[in-house]
Image: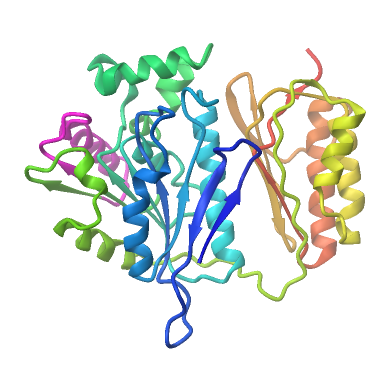
Amino acid sequence: MSELLRYGVHDDQVLELHEPGPTAHGDGPTGVAVLVHGGYWRARFTCDLMAPMAADLVRRGWAVANVEYRRVGAGGSWPVILDDARAGVDLAVVTASERGWSGPVVTVGHSVGGQLALLTAERGVDGVVALAPVTDLPRTRREHLGDDAVEELVAASPGQEESLLRDGSALGQLPVGVPVLVVHGDADVRVPLAHSQDYVAAARSAGDDVELRTLPGVDHLALIAADAPWWEDTVAWMSALRPRRRQHLAGQSMTRWDFKYDWAGPLGAHQIADLRALVDVSDPAVSSAVERWLKVLERVSVTHLPGEVYGLGGAKVTVEREVDGELTLALRSGGDDAFDSIGSAADALHDAVADGGGARIRWIELPYEPAFT
């Protein structure tokens, strides 16, 4: 069974979810593979690149989430591309939890998809398979790899060059904290093997559990073929991962609050009304908190905001926000201005979820900018 799931409003903010057929014993999927394609961030390359791999994994009993994201030439820039990857991985992890799938969740990324897989390793996955990953953007730029793909991405991301080169380099974001398998061919000229060798050495020094498998005579694109001998060993590595404990939501009372917007300027009354229409407030434990949150939004100017808010039972609701390019995670407890009121709204959401005994609120990629100087 296949379906298209959305994590945003843009045409490319989707993932293709493929489920294997039922087994004789009624077991769920072996695991969930979250596929992230490469193509050096260019719009002409799509998630179709990973279709053969997806089909093979489904035949092996895996559920597959094949993630699409905005790319240069189709609304993509930095950090939009990373924001989309985070939201896509988040949706895959939450879907696995909601459907009670108990196997490992593994991100599999090729080329710049490997970059994004490594940069989203903290989003609740159990491991990462990085196939010829782009891990060092300054070096990729210096070596003019991908026909100067980094220069194209810099040009498409005004004012973000420093952030891109720093935060977009997996080499500088260690440790990742989950097992990583790096697979790289020694005949690769699109991303030379030395990049992965240096990444693995740095990751091990940072304390990560990382393995490098070097494939003699294999080039860059051959790594997304699902019929090569090395692929069997890769799937075996994925299957051997130990899944973390996740809360399964089957049978619980659930309310989902799930929306995304990219409006610029102060939110007007009609935009607040549009937001309210997107929110399921059928659970009375959530309704009043949502209204309070929307009142906060009336005082916030919105540009392009990254972050998430989610809660289950009495779990804390956190606020992840980007201010002046610096990522901050905080749960604020009050205040008189718009900035502190963000935290007050998060507290209100937390209280509502706790009182609701199982209600769930999920906010994906809600960017904002405080409406004051």
Q: Is residue 188 left or right of residue 343?
A: left
Q: Say whether residue 187 is magenta.
A: yes
Residue 130 in the image: above or below residue 1: above
Considering every residue shown, the one lying at the far left of the view is 217
- Residue 148 visible from this viewpoint: yes
| Residue 335, quarter of picture | top right
The location of residue 364, given as percent across then percent down, is 66, 43
In this rendered view, identify the residue nearer to me: 158 or 221.
Answer: 221
Q: Quadrant of residue 322?
A: top right
In the rendered image, residue 210, in percent from the top left (x then y), is placed at 27, 49
- Residue 319 percent location from the top left of the image: 69, 40
Q: Looking at the image, can residue 183 be seen?
A: no
From what the image shows, is residue 185 above or below residue 143? Answer: below
Q: How is the image coloured?
A: rainbow
Front residue of this view, candidates 141 and 319: 141
Which quadrant is home to the C terminus? Answer: top right
Residue at image point 85% right, 36% down: 334
42 vs 263, nearest the viewer: 42
Q: Measured from the top left, where is residue 4 in percent x and y?
A: 56, 53
Q: Which residues are magenta?
A: 184-210
Q: Is residue 34 above or below residue 198?
A: below
Any magenta on residue 174? no
Query: In the depicted view, which residue is nearer to us: 360 or 76?
Result: 76
- Please give the count of numbered marks on the rendered protein: 0
Is residue 5 rendered to the left or right of residue 218? right
At horizontal 47% and vertical 79% (from top left) the residue drawn is 22
Please tell me whether residue 9 is drawn above or below residue 282 in the rendered image.
above
